[in-house]
Structure formats: C-alpha cells, structure tokens
Amino acid sequence: MTAPRLLVAGHIMMDVVVKPESAIEPTSDTPSQVSISRGGAGANIARSAHATGVTATFVGAIGDDLIGSLVASQFDFPVEFQRSALPTGALVALVHADGQRAMLTQAGANDDLSSDFLIQALETHQPQWFHLSGYVILSPATRAAGQAAISHARHLGIPVSTDACSVGPLTAMGPRTFIEAITGVSLLCTNAEEFEILEPHLGDVDLDLLTTLGADGARFSTRDGRWEVPSVATTVIDTTGAGDAATGAFLASRLLNADPELALRSAMSRAAEVIGRLGAN
C-alpha cells in the first residue's frame, strides 16, 4: 500500500547547538558540548514525519555557499531546494543545564522563499496534507508567499496545518494578526507558552489545536473532543527541535489513520528521543 504523502515547507538552517559545562567565561574558553547539524523547524517536522511512516517531502530555500552544500548533504528523506543568492540560514542555540535554550538566528536564504516555488511544489506533489512552518508567516519577507501557498492548497482541496514557532516573533507580529494571516489553516500547533499568547484570540476561530506541554505531555483539542497524554521523556539534555519532532510524528500518525490519543503518544515518543540528545537530529 502506498504511504500517505505529506508536504512540508519552511526554514532550513545549519544548527550549531552549544551546551556549556560550566559558567560562561566572557573573555576566555568555556568547556562545552557542541553539535553541528542540519536544522530548521520545517525540515525537523518533515524528518520526524518521514521516520513515522509517511512519505514526507520538504521544500525550502538554501544559499549557494559552503553551509548550503553541507546542509543539503544531511537530508535522508525527499527534499527540494529553492536556490538563493542569500547565505544559507544559520542558528546558534545556547542550551541551559535544564535543557531549555536560547536561539540566535540568521534567516538568510529562508527569506527568499517564493510563492511560485511553494505553489509549484503543491502542484507537483499533490499531497494528502500540507504543513507550512509558521516562520514563513511570521517573517514579513515571506508572509505573502505563505498565505498564497495556504490559499492554493485549499483550492486544491488539501488540508493545511501550521505552527506558532516562537514566542518572540509571534509577540512582535501580534497574536490577532497572526491568526488572521493563517486563514484557511485547519490545525494549529503550539507549545504551552505560545498557546497562552494566542488563546484569547481563538474563541471564534475554527481550528484544531495541538499543544505540547513540556514535562506535562501534549494535548489535542477539536470542537468535538479533547485528548491529553503525559510526557514519556526520562532524560532532558536539550529541548531543541522537540516540538518539531512531536508535530511531525502527530501529523504522520493522523495521516496513517491513528486515533488522536495514539497520535499524541507517537508525538511524545518522538519528542523524548530528541530531548535525550544534543541537537535536533
């Protein structure tokens, strides 16, 4: 039987994840654990979905530079690139002892992602589901392209999901503006902090909601019901990419006809794998 097709569009990054082993010495060396790998929220979601059993294809933009070449070599699932004159996106994550992290980002080529590229990908792949990384909507440079992709997916009869991605850009854009910008989306994925910001603006919006709750697990809410499962993580090394992994596994499980509780459990299992090591991959 042919596996369901998921198309994911979003950011590609080179992730440099650093976990200091002691207090940072501002003018000297600080022993640290360092992980360098392909990252980006959209790419992480696609990888998790593909590992869960669907045919997940990722589309995004990279630069014609050394980092772009390194990033491109790190994909072990289907991917298509839009090439850009801008440098490939990069991220430095500083991981605290409790596994939480602060991220320093350069969007680079991700801000070149075009509506033509996204629409062509939808036409070519004709997926059963389309996930658009919320970073595409949060960035003024790509917002119109993201909205055009959502509209075209709906025109083709393809359901769409997105995620809130990051508290800082979400707050800067404004929760009401974000909700209005994702008109046409069926499923919104958030973490607990993002949900708290968005909740006052969700009352009249017909959206299913997937919410990761950190150590408290995850919740899925629709107009017809609500499901919650606990976290299964036993070791927390680094939370980078955990939410993306959960989203990808949940989407894949639902496409494979899993009920909401089973899909949530799959999401928590995938997230636990990620947070038990340094880096999102």
Image: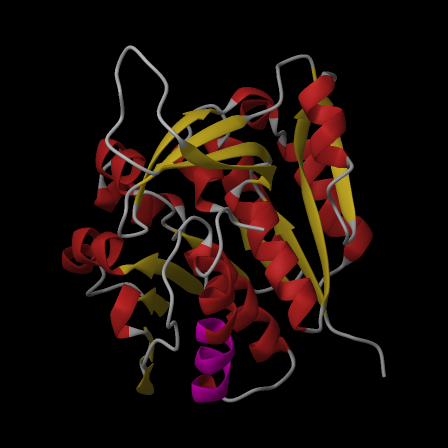
Q: Residue at x 14, y 57 (%)?
A: 200
Residue 221, compared with residue 17, is above or below; it is below
Image coords of residue 175 (percent x, y): 23, 45
Q: Residue at x 84, y 77 (%)?
A: 2
Question: Where is residue 3, by image quadrant?
Answer: bottom right
Image coords of residue 253 (percent x, y): 58, 78
Q: Residue at x 23, y 64 (%)?
A: 204
- Most foreground residue, 122 or 280: 280
Image coords of residue 262 (percent x, y): 49, 87
Q: Is residue 225 magenta?
A: no
Q: Looking at this rendering, what residue extends furthest in the right direction?
A: 1
Question: Which residues make up the magenta segment?
Answer: 261-268
Question: Where is residue 92, by image quadrant?
Answer: top left
Question: Where is residue 166, by image quadrant?
Answer: top left
Residue 244 visible in this rendered orientation of the protein: yes
Q: Looking at this rendering, what residue extends furthest in the left direction?
A: 200
Q: Is residue 266 magenta?
A: yes
Q: In the drawing, does residue 227 fall left or right of residue 139? A: left
Residue 252, compared with residue 175, is above or below; it is below
Residue 202, compared with residue 113, is above or below; it is below
Residue 155 visible in this rendered orientation of the protein: no
Q: Main secondary structure of the magenta part?
A: helix
Image coords of residue 78 (percent x, y): 79, 51
Q: In the drawing, does residue 204 fall left or right of residue 15? A: left
